[in-house]
Amino acid sequence: ALAILEDLGKGKGEAGRFAAEEFGAMAARLGRKEWFTARMSACAVYPQIMERMGYTGALGAEGDGLDEHVQIFSCLCRDDTPMVRRVASKHLGPFLRAVVRLCGPDAAVRGPVPAVLVPLYEELGADDQDSVRLQTTENSVAFAAALSPLGEEARDLVRRRVLPLLKDAVDDRSWRVRWTVASKFGAACVALSPSSRRSAEEWMVPCFEKLLADPEAEVKTAATLNLPSVARCLGCYDGVEAAADHTSQDGAVSNSMGRILERVTKLTDDESEHVRAALASVITELAPILGREQTLSSLLPPLLILLRDQISQVRLNLISSLGALNSVIGVGLLAQSLLPAILNLSEDNKWRIRLHVIQLIPVLAKQLGSELFTAQLSAVCVRWLGDDISSIREAAVENLRDLAALFGREWAFLHLLPSVRGIIGHDSYLRRSVAVRACAAMAGVVDRESAAGTLLPMVAGAAVDAVPNVRFTAARALRTMAPAVDVAAREGRIRPALAGLCEDPDVDVRFFARRALTSLEEFVHGGGGGDNGGQEDAATSAQVLPTVATMVHC
C-alpha cells in the first residue's frame, strides 16, 4: 500500500492529492477496526501517510483535517491490546516528525505536540507492558531531535517532559528496557545535548554509571559500546567551558570524565568476558578525547590489564584498535608499554589472535620506524613463515611484502632475505613452498635488478625441488614475477624454467606450468590476461584437481 502511495503521490498534482486523501481515509478506517491486526497496520502506515498528505496538500494549506488523524492515532496509543500499543509506540516518533512538518514550529510547540503527543509519550513510557516501554528511548531521541531545533520553548519542553522518562527507564525493572536505553544512550546524549557540564552531570553521568554497573551483562555490554559517544559529549562540554574561562586544564580531567574512567577501570575485572571484550573494542577511542597526559595516567593502566586478559577475544579486540592510542601517546611509549604484550600475543595459542597481530604489523612498522621495528619485531615476522597454520603463513608472506615496500630493498634484503633463504632449504616442503611465495611477493615491491638478480634465482631453484608441490608453487611464482623483472630475465630464466616444468613427470606440475606459460604469453603479447592468471589457475585447479587444491592449502 505504501509503495502504491509513494508512486501515485510523487507529485503535488491532482492524482497525488487524490491518492493521499484515499490512503488517509484508509488509515482512519483501519484505526477504527474491531480486529486488532487492522489497528496494528494503521499504526505502522500512519506516519508515512501523514507525510504524504502534507506534501500533496491533501490536508489543506492550514493542515485541515489533522486533528482527526491525531485523535485516531492517540486512540491507538491507548488501545486495550498491548500489541497495538507496542506498534503505536514504535511509530510515535515518526508520527511526531510528520506532525511537526505539517504544523510548523509555532503550531508544533503550542498545538498537538504538547497537548496530545507528549502526553502519549509519557503514558507509553509508563505502560505496564515491557514490550511497550522498550520504545521509550527511541521515542525520546525522536522527540528531542524533532523539537530541539524549534527554539528555547521546545527545548524546555524536552527537558521537562521528555528527559524524565528516559532517566526512569535506566532504573526500569525489565532488563530488556534497560538494555534498550544502554544501546541507544550515545544517540540520546547527542539528541538531548545538555547545555553545560553541570546539566550533563545532573543526568548523563549518573545514568551512564548505573548502566555500566547494571547487574545484567547484556546491559553493561551495550552501555560499554556507547562509551566513546558519551565521552565525546562530555569532552565537548569540558572544552567549551575551559575556553570560556580562559583557563588551561593542565592535564586535569573533569569530575564527570573521572567518574566514567573509574567505572571503566572496574569493567576490566568484570566477570563477563563479553563486557570486557566490548570494552577492549572501544577503550582506545577515548585517547583522543582525553589527551596525552590523561591517557597515560588514567587510560593506559586499564588498557594493559585488558592486554593480559585470559580471554583471547578481549585481546583480539584491543590489538585491532591500537592506532588511535598510538596517535596520542607517541611511538616511544607505545614500544615501552605495548610491544611486550604484542610479542606475547604473536605466540598466542589461538591462531586468529596471531593472524590479527600480523595484520597489525604494517601499521606498527610505519609508526615505529625501521630501527625500533627491527629490534623488536622483525624476527617475529620471519618466524611466522614457519607457523603450523596455513592462513598464518599466507598472511606472513603478505606481511613481508608490505614491510619490504615500506622500508625498502636494502632493509628487506638485510633483515628478511637471509631467513627466507634459509627456509628454502628446510626439510618440510610446506616451509619451502611458503619461502618461494615470499620471494615472489617481495619481487613485486623491489627494483628490477634486485628481483632478477637475487629473488628470481631462488624461485627458479625451487623449480627442480624433489617434491611436486614445491615445483608447481614455483611455476606459479615464476609467472607472478614476470612483470617484476626485465625482458632478459623473463626470456632467459622464467620461460625456460616453465618450459622445463611443462615436461615434468608429475601431472599436477605440468598442469600449473602450462597454465603459467599460457598466461605469460598473454602478458607478453599484451592480451591483458596477466593479472588474472593466478586466480584462473586457482579456480581451475579447484574444479579439476580437488586433491591438489587441498594439498596446496594445507
Image (cartoon, rainbow, N blue to C red):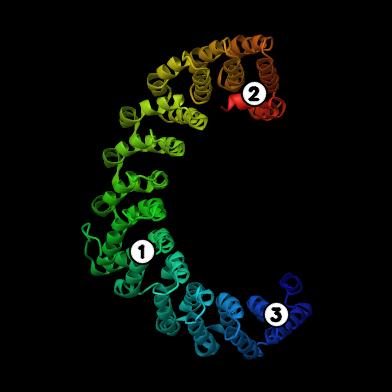
Q: Amino acid at mark 1?
A: Leu
Q: Which mark is residue 212?
A: 1
Front-most of residues 71 and 8: 71
Q: Earlier in the sequence, mark 2 or mark 1?
A: 1
Answer with left or right where residue 318 lies relative to residue 29: left
In which quadrant of the rendered view does residue 178 lie? bottom left
As measured in the structure, the alpha-carbon distance from the residue carrying label 2 to the one carrying label 3 is 61 Å
Q: Residue 463, relative to residue 375: is it above or below?
A: above
When asked about the image quadrant of residue 93, the answer is bottom right
Toward the viewer: 284 or 543?
Answer: 543
Q: Report if the CB atoms under discs 2 and 3 are less than 8 Å apart.
A: no
N-term mark: 2 or 3: 3
Q: With 325 as the anchor, is 251 left or right in this view? A: left
Report how far apart the C-alphas of labels 1 and 3 lie in the structure: 41 Å
- Residue that badge 2 annotates: 548
Task: Assign a secondary structure to mark 3.
Answer: helix
Asked if the residues shown at circle 2 and circle 1 are in contact, with their CB atoms under 8 angstroms apart, the answer is no
Look at mark 3 in the image and give the residue it sits on: 38
- Residue at 50 percent of width and 85 percent of height: 123
Q: Amino acid at mark 3?
A: Ala
Q: Quadrant of the C terminus?
A: top right
Out of 320 and 266, give the one closest to the viewer. 266
Q: Residue at x 57, y 13 (%)?
A: 467
**Of the residues under marks 1 and 3, which one precedes in the sequence?**
3
**Figure quadrant of the N terminus:** bottom right
- Which of the pair 443/279 is nearer the observer? 279
Horizontal and vertical percent for residue 32?
A: 69, 87
- Residue kind at label 2, given as amino acid type: Val
Residue 214 placed where, x, y %? 37, 66
